[in-house]
Image: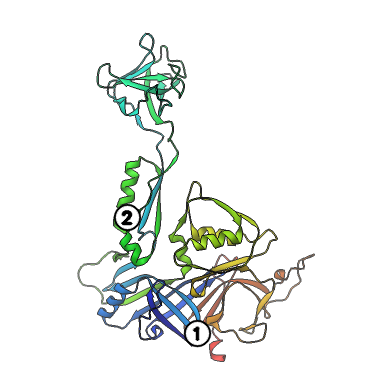
Amino acid sequence: MFSLNLYGPLTGNAFIESDNLAEIAKNWSRTSLAIGGFDEGSFTVENLARSTLTEYFDRWLGYRLVEESYGKLSWEGIIWQLDLVLDGINFRRTFDVEWWANKVKAVYSYPTVEDTQQGNFAYRAFPFAHNFQDDGQDFSDWDTNPAAPPAVYRISVINDDDTTANGFLGLAFTITNANDSIYVYTDVSLTVAGWNGTVAGKTPVSYIVSNVLLSGVRQDTGWTTNNDCVEQYGRQEYVISLPGTKPAAATALRDRYLNEYAWPSSRMVGSDIVIGKRKKTRDVLEVTVKGYWHTLNWRHRETSGAGTTSELITSLTGDSEFVTVGRIETNSDDSFVDCDPNIQGLGDLVEMLIDQGDISGNIWQGGVYENRGMIYKQAPSKETHILTDGMLYDLGSSLVIPTLLKPGFYLRNTNAPAGQLPPGSYNFWDDPQVSYIDEVKFSAPDKLSLKLADTKTSVSLMLSQIIGKL
C-alpha cells in the first residue's frame, strides 16, 4: 500500500537503503497541515543488532525520507532527530535549533549604565571650571575632546537630598590620581560648561555614566559560521537575543555557542543515569522526520519589506536553501514583513502572510509538498469531501485513499445532527454538518485522522475503514 525509501542527505536523490524501510519502520505515522504542508512523522526501529541501530544513528540524520503510495510521492521529509536508547540511556542527534546551529549571531541592547561611583567624589565649580572628581575613577575611557563633539558619554548625579544633576563629559584630567576628574557641559556639543540642575551646596552620593549614542540601542555582533558543517548539512542560523550587555561579552557568548553547537553531535538526554543493577531494556531507535517547511526558519530576513502577499511569499521562499517555489497563486493584497528591530525566520514570515488571508475575508493555505515545492492558494469555497457512515468520499463518490489525502478542505458529515443556519446567514460553513479540516494524520497501516480547525484539543475523526474496502 505504501513504501518508505531513504535517500541521500536533504536534497539527495541517491537511493540509500536497498530495502523498503516500511518493513522495519514500526508505528509509522505522519501529519500534514493546511499551513505548513508535510509536517512531521515518526517511526521506531527495534529487534535489530545493536551495531545496526548504532550505524543508523550515526548515519541517517539529514537523510531524505520519501513515502510513496500507488506510484505517487505521498509524503516526504528529513530525518530530523534520532533517539537511540541503549541500556535505558537515551542518546540524541537532532536538528533542533536549541541543540544545533552552524551560523550564529547575538543581538543585544547596549547597557544604559557604563559604570557607577568608585571612591570619594565631589562637584568642582568656578574657579575650577565645571568638573566632577572621583579619586577612585579613571575617566579617560569616557572623555570627549570639545574640539571634536558631540559628547559620547553622559553623567547623571544623585545628591543627598534626592535632587539630580546631569551633564555631558568632556576631557579628563588629573587632580590627585590619574584622570580622576572630568569637565562637564550642559549640551552634547560641549559648548556650554556646567550642569543641567543646580549643584551649589549639594553633596553627590551616587552617579551613573551612560553612552549617549548607544545606550539602549539594539546592537549586532555579526555572524560567525562553521563552513564545514554548512557544507555537510546546510545552513542553520541562530540568533541569540540578550538584554543590556557589552560588545565583548556578546561576542564571547556567540563564539561559545557556535563552538558548542556547530555540529549535531550525540548527547545523552532524559532522566538520571542509574549506576549498578538495572532492569534490562530493549534497544530501540526512535526516528523523527520533519517536512521541508521546517527548514525555512533555518534562515532569517533582516530587513523589512513591502509588496503583494504572493510576491513576498515567492521572495521569502526563494531565499531558503531547500524549499523551491512551486505553485504560488496571485494574492494582490498589499502586505508587509516587519524585521526591525527583530530579525525574523523565513518560515515565521511565510506563515504570517498565509494566515492573514485576504481583504475579502477568504481563507488561504500554503505549505511545502512534493519535490519540496511551496504551494500557496486560496482555500476551497465549498465542501470537497463527504463523510458518510464512517466512510470518506470525494465529490465523485470515490473512496479517498488515506495516504494521498491533503489538508485544507471543507468536509460535510452527513451523519452530523442537522440544524438550521443562523438567521440571515447564507454561508455554507455555518452549516452544522460542515467543518474545515486543517490537519490530516496517517498512521500505518490504515488509520486516517482528520483534525477540525480551531479546536483547542485534538478532535479527530478516526477512519480505520478505508484501506480494507478499496
Task: Give above or below for 378 relative to 188.
Answer: below
- In-image side of 354 versus 209 (left or right): right
- In-image side of 358 versus 470 (left or right): right
Q: Are marks 2 and 1 in contact (CB under 8 Å)?
A: no
Residue 450, position in %: x, y? 57, 75
The residue most toward the front is 147
The residue most toward the left is 276
The residue most toward the right is 424
Residue 213, position in %: x, y? 44, 33
Helix, strand or loop for disc 2: helix
Q: Amino acid at mark 2?
A: Leu
Q: Kindly tell me whether residue 309 is visible in this rendering.
A: yes
Give whichever of 137, 129 is nearer the camera. Answer: 129
Tell me the residue at 72%/76% (across/down): 418
Mark 1 neighbour density, 10 Å: few (under 14) some (14–19) many (20 or more): some
Helix, strand or loop for disc 1: strand
Q: Kindly tell me whether residue 94 is visible in this rendering.
A: no
Residue 373, position in %: x, y? 52, 71
Mark 2 neighbour density, 10 Å: few (under 14) some (14–19) many (20 or more): many
Residue under label 1: 69
* The image quarter in which residue 271 lies: bottom left
Badge number at residue 141: none
Residue under label 2: 258
**Mark closer to the chain start, 2 or 1:** 1
Task: Give above or below for 445 relative to 427.
Answer: below
Give whichever of 279, 397 is nearer the camera. Answer: 397
Query: Quick one: quadrant of the C terminus?
Result: bottom right
